Image (tube, coloured by chain):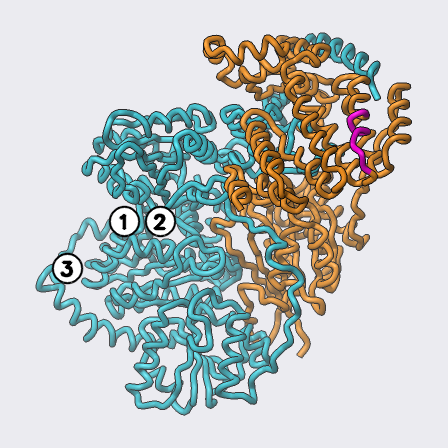
Chain colours: A orange, B cyan
């Protein structure tokens, strides 16, 4: 007997409207000559966890009431719908996608899991791996960024998925009855229909979206810029161009042309024919030289381009007023570091003075950048750029940079080792306690390196251990081992 | 007000004979109760039966018309004790809860009502939270049915049958003077379907009428000598009466051919999965046309010896499909077969897994193993297995977590900060959304001993100079925590801290009102403060914080409580409204105000990608779903940057955490003024003019030194 049943599994996250989608599909069956049954396992999974909704339908008018199952059986699912890329992966992992049977409809956008988000570096799972498996294992795969489509249509993602389901042709119903199900739902009908249409069109197009290619760096606009690019082209290997040009651009913005020249001088001092090493050095040296001091933060916060970006990010309409408040917490240390080196050192060295000044910087400030008072304050601070070279932080950071470069230069004969040393700059990031922790980890690794016997592989393991947990347990273990 | 409104469903409860009811399983049960002339209903919410409680709460008008009394019970014990109304009077009563946890709480009252027996039908509706998606210990309610002698119904997942079993359950209860349990698995509770409705029936006697004409029968009270008589009555009268009723009304069903050398006995609730498993190996069809005899136990306790004999006689082997352990049914079948002198082999857990949910795949594999031994000619060929497309590690897990803007998150952020200063604490956790604290990114909580038992779970810890911390939800507080936790701590002179998380609702179960809810509720008395109750039982050190989002204040309060010189139990009430419910309340109002041209300020948060360095400390201290990551727009930086997506509700925790923990200056709060008034506009224009001029000057200067 030919199979008449249609089994549909919907995988999503709590709060994405999977229930609404399942209801629409059940309605669709119910009203169009099928006996349909939907079920789900809500409970705590509704609070941000993964959920599975399951719908089965059979043509009505059979010899008896059909016996419909309450959960999908691996290999027996006709349509698998997933509202996010890793949920698409989960559908495959759980066996709901079979080559001989399953139409897989999955959004390719990401909602990161807590393990991916909370990693100290980059903890993201591989998207490409899921996409490859989806293409290999499904009878047909309809995948596109449905979150973006929903955004454009101003509807929940469930409407896009429903449209894609209609567009896939996997269900024996014409488009009009899908739309009727949305209308019957009676909620946000116009937005849902718009989303449905977008999903339908995308599925009919049948293609996965092509992934955007990284934009090329913008060309120089000034004579100074052009001169520096010419220098990069003549002095550095081609593999380092992109990072070095970006580095130069960044440091001219950060300080001035002379600072960018200092950057190229330093890059040029690394004796190596290894293009990969110079490229990574170009990246990490630029990042280190553009360290985030209070001057830089103030400068970035008050730019017109940043005001525009915030408006865009919060989707403010032109007639709406947006007030922006920063959560800043400059500690006495950071303030002193902005002062001329001698003065800053004196205050930090004097217990009495620090103790007296401390209370003034013990509390975080709510800084309303869009208000005149704080804007002027930050504007003044950003203007300290002119005296940055005299600041305590400058002296300290540049001593660190020189020491680091010295290590890299000394190791340059072993380019793998030099590369790993270069990458250790990754550990130094953030502000306040985060910065202190990263710097301490960096110092411990370098100290260990100086004792000798550490090759490229060992150095990489130490660096990875430093990024494994916040309390430094993995690093302790790695250093002990 | 509950998470979901059931106004539409309530309308369906009114339909009568000739109409078709459409909806999910638990609502079908609700309708079935009204059709059965139920006189009173009680229960305690919890997945998967919350909807039953919510529907009744929304249907007060209909209930009043029918003369049905409904109560949102304080606990399952309170609900079970309601069944006392069916002891002396012909009142049909139903109570509902999540099992096995709710049955644990209710078991004192259940033992009493089961001992004395009932006159009116008493039905206990259980949402059996077992298997995928379950949030509780994996145990069987079956054991309770056996030990207290209550009959256990486990109907085949089919709405018409489930509805019928509700009515039959009342009749069985009355025929055998025994309370009856109706067990529904999670998916059956949420399964949609339809059935032919019947008219609702007013109860033959209402609770009002019963109160006005009291009856007393000392033989129904559990006290010597009656308690000993009850036991005799159970085995000599009630048990046989139940067997007669089950057999006479054909509560159990048969599928498939009349005779065969093998057969299958299955719990009713698993029938659909069994049929699918059989279909996959060509032993049944989509309509339940099994090609092996199947005996479906819609009543899993007691088993009917005659039925078992009839089914097993002439068969070499019978497969028992029984989920969970211990395998009570399998044991009983072996006894019955032996007593009947049959040679039939009872095969169960030796081919099916001892633990875990019986999905279609699991049953198919077990059935195949059974067939290979007992009917090899009907066994399916061994199918080649494809190598997995993905290793499990390729797909990250998604543990449940606090919702966007949840007021409980900052409490645990604050605890994390206190632990940074003072070292780790022993934390006795409780049941509720707050238990998500044990998961990433908080990793707080050492044990959880049951609903409302957080404080009791810390009572063995008598600190020298480091106190233990107990967590308790407001739901758990009123369920039993006030006495078992706070009262106990006062009496035993504990020196620990209890943080009561007061979000205004029983939030984890769907946002039902509780005594301390702030909402005005027409049918319930709310606004009973938790701190007042705690002081009432003798707590001296008690404090209420009304804005948990103030992470620094929260941290300081916790620090103070664990370091304060006074001895004795300390209670810190951390109070802020459940954001899920708040949004449901506030969002439509806000949309309406914006639409009508009113000035509205919406807050949301953001992260500046050019100052964020991608360390994600902020995420490790918050874990808000709206605080996520995105690829670093900076060509040089490799680690993804933090990012606040548009689902942000503007609670401000990310900014506060960043402030309090001195993390980073990347967070900003944006206040978006909808429909700005004249003052707003003039102010904005003035500021814009001054700031714009300065920005243009800075841009010019930057352009002069630009790349």
* Residue that appears at 54% across and 75% down: B364
x%, y% of residue A344? Answer: 58, 11
Q: Is residue B154 magenta?
A: no
Image quarter (top left, top right, bottom left or bottom right) of the C terminus of chain B: top right
Between the C-alphas of marks 2 and 3, the distance is 25 Å
On the image, which quarter does residue B248 sit in? bottom left
- Which residue is disc 1 drawn over? B78
- Which residue is disc 3 drawn over? B222
Q: Where is B223 relative to A250, above or below?
A: below
* Residue that appears at 17% across and 69% down: B231
Q: What element does badge 1 sit on?
A: helix
Mark 1: few, some, or many residues within 10 Å (few <14, many ≥20)?
Answer: many
Residue B61 or A307: which is nearer the viewer? A307
Query: Which disc number belongs to residue B662?
Result: none
Mark 3: few, some, or many residues within 10 Å (few <14, many ≥20)?
Answer: some
Say if residue B201 shows up in the picture: no
Q: What element does badge 2 sit on?
A: loop
Residue B149 or B634: which is nearer the viewer? B634
Bounds of the magenta span? A265-272
Between the C-alphas of marks 1 and 3, the distance is 18 Å
On the image, which quarter does residue B486 sit in? top left
Q: Residue furthest left?
A: B225
Q: Where is B125 relative to B301, above or below?
A: above
Q: Which badge, 2 or 3, is on the more N-terminal residue?
A: 2
Between the C-alphas of marks 2 and 1, the distance is 9 Å
Q: What element does badge 3 sit on?
A: loop
* Residue that appears at 49% across and 82% down: B370
- Which residue is disc 2 drawn over? B44
């Amino acid at each position: 007997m030919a199979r008449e049943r249609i089994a549909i599994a919907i995988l999503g996250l709590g709060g994405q409207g999977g229930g609404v989608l399942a209801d629409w599909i059940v309605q669709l069956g119910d009203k169009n000559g099928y006996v349909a049954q939907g079920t789900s396992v809500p409970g705590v999974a509704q609070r941000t966890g993964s959920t599975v909704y399951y719908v089965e339908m059979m043509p009505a008018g059979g010899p008896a009431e059909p016996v419909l199952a309450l959960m999908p059986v691996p290999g027996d699912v006709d349509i698998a719908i997933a509202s996010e890329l890793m949920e698409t992966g989960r559908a495959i992992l759980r066996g709901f996608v079979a080559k001989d049977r399953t139409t897989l409809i999955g959004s390719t956008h990401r909602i990161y899991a807590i393990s991916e988000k909370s990693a100290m570096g980059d903890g993201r799972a591989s998207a490409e791996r899921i996409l490859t498996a989806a293409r290999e294992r499904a009878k047909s795969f309809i995948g596109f960024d449905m979150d973006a489509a929903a955004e454009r249509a101003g509807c929940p993602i469930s409407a896009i998925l429903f449209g894609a389901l209609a567009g896939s042709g996997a269900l024996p119903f014409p488009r009009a009855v899908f739309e009727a199900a949305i209308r019957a739902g009676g909620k946000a009908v116009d937005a849902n229909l718009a989303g449905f249409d977008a999903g339908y069109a995308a599925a009919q197009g049948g293609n996965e979206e092509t992934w955007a290619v990284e934009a090329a760096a913008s060309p120089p606009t000034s004579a100074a810029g052009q001169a520096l690019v010419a220098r990069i082209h003549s002095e550095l290997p081609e593999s380092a161009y992109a990072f070095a040009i970006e580095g130069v651009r960044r440091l001219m913005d950060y300080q001035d042309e002379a600072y960018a020249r200092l950057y190229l001088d330093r890059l040029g001092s690394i004796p190596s024919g290894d293009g990969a090493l110079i490229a990574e050095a170009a990246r990490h040296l630029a990042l280190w030289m553009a360290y985030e001091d209070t001057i830089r933060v103030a400068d970035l916060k008050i730019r017109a381009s940043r005001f525009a970006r915030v408006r865009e990010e919060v989707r403010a309409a032109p007639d709406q007023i947006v007030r922006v408040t920063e959560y800043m917490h400059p500690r006495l240390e950071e303030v002193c570091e902005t002062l001329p080196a001698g003065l800053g050192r004196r205050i930090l060295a004097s217990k009495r003075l620090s103790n007296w000044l401390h209370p003034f910087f013990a509390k975080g400030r709510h800084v309303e950048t869009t208000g005149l008072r704080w804007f002027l304050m930050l504007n003044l601070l950003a203007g300290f750029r002119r005296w940055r070279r005299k600041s305590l932080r400058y002296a300290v950071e540049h001593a660190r940079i020189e020491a680091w470069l010295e290590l890299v230069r000394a190791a340059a004969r072993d380019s793998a080792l030099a590369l790993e040393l270069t990458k250790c700059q990754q550990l130094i990031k953030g502000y306040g306690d985060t910065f202190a922790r990263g710097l301490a980890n960096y110092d411990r690794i370098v100290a260990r390196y100086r004792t000798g016997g550490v090759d490229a592989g060992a150095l990489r393991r130490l660096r990875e251990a430093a990024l494994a947990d916040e309390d430094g347990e993995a690093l302790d273990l790695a250093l002990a081992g | 007000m509950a998470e979901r409104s059931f106004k539409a469903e309530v309308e369906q409860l009114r339909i009568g004979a000739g109409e078709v009811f459409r909806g999910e399983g638990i609502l079908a049960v609700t309708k079935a109760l009204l059709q059965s002339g139920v006189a009173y209903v009680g229960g305690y919410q919890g997945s998967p039966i919350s909807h039953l409680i919510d529907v009744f709460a929304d249907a007060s008008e209909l209930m009043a018309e029918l003369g049905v009394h409904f109560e949102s019970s304080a606990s399952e014990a309170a609900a079970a004790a309601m069944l006392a109304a069916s002891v002396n009077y012909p009142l049909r009563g139903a109570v509902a809860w999540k099992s096995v946890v709710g049955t644990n709480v209710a078991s004192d009252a259940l033992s009493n009502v089961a001992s004395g027996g009932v006159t009116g039908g008493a039905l206990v509706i259980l949402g059996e939270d077992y298997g995928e998606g379950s949030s509780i210990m994996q145990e069987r309610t079956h054991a309770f049915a056996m030990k207290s002698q209550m009959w256990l119904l486990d109907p085949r997942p089919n709405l018409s049958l489930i509805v019928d079993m509700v009515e039959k359950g009342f009749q069985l209860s009355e025929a055998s003077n025994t309370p009856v349990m109706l067990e529904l698995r999670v998916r059956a509770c949420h399964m949609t379907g339809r059935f032919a409705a019947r008219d609702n029936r007013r109860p033959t006697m209402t609770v009002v009428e019963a109160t006005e004409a009291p009856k007393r029968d000392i033989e129904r009270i559990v006290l010597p000598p009656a308690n000993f008589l009850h036991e005799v009555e159970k085995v000599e009268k009630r048990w046989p009466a139940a067997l007669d009723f089950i057999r006479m009304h054909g509560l159990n069903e048969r599928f498939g051919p009349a005779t065969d050398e093998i057969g299958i006995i299955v719990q009713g609730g698993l029938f659909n999965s069994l049929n699918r498993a059989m279909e996959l190996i060509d032993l049944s069809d989509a309509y339940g046309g099994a090609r092996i005899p199947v005996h479906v136990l819609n009543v899993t306790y007691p088993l009917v010896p005659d039925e078992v004999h009839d089914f097993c006689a002439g068969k070499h082997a019978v497969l028992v499909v029984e989920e969970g352990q211990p395998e009570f049914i399998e044991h009983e079948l072996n006894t019955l077969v032996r007593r009947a002198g049959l040679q039939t082999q009872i095969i169960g857990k030796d081919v099916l897994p001892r633990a875990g949910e019986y999905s279609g795949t699991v049953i198919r594999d077990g059935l195949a193993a059974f067939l290979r031994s007992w009917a090899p000619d009907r066994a399916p060929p061994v199918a080649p297995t494809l190598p997995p497309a993905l290793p499990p590690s390729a797909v990250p897990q998604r543990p449940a977590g606090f919702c966007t803007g949840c007021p409980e998150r900052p409490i645990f952020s604050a605890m994390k900060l206190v632990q940074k200063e003072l070292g780790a604490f022993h934390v006795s956790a409780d049941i509720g959304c707050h238990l998500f604290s044990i998961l990433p990114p908080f990793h707080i909580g050492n044990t959880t001993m049951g609903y409302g038992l957080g404080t009791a779970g810390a009572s063995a810890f008598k600190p020298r100079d480091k106190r233990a911390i107990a967590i308790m939800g407001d739901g758990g507080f009123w369920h039993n925590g006030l006495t078992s936790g706070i009262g106990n701590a006062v009496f035993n002179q504990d020196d620990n801290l209890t943080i009561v998380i007061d979000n205004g609702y029983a939030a984890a179960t769907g946002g039902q009102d509780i005594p301390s809810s702030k909402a005005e509720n027409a049918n319930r008395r709310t606004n009973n403060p938790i701190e007042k109750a705690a002081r009432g039982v003798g707590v001296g050190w008690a404090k209420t914080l009304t804005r948990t989002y103030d992470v620094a204040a929260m941290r300081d309060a916790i620090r103070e409580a664990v370091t304060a010189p006074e001895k004795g139990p300390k209670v810190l009430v951390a109070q802020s409204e459940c954001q899920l419910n708040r949004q449901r309340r506030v969002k439509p109002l806000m949309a309406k105000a914006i639409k009508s041209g009113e000035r509205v300020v919406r807050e949301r948060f953001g992260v500046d990608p050019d100052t964020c360095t991608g360390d994600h400390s902020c995420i490790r201290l918050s874990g808000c779903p709206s605080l996520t990551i995105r690829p670093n727009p900076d060509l040089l930086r490799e680690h993804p940057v933090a990012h606040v997506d548009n689902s942000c509700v503007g609670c401000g925790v990310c900014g506060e955490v960043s402030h309090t923990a001195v993390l980073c200056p990347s967070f900003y709060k944006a206040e978006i003024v909808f429909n700005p008034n004249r003052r707003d506009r003039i102010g904005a224009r003035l500021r814009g003019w001054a700031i714009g001029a300065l920005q243009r000057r800075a841009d010019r200067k930057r352009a002069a030194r630009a790349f």
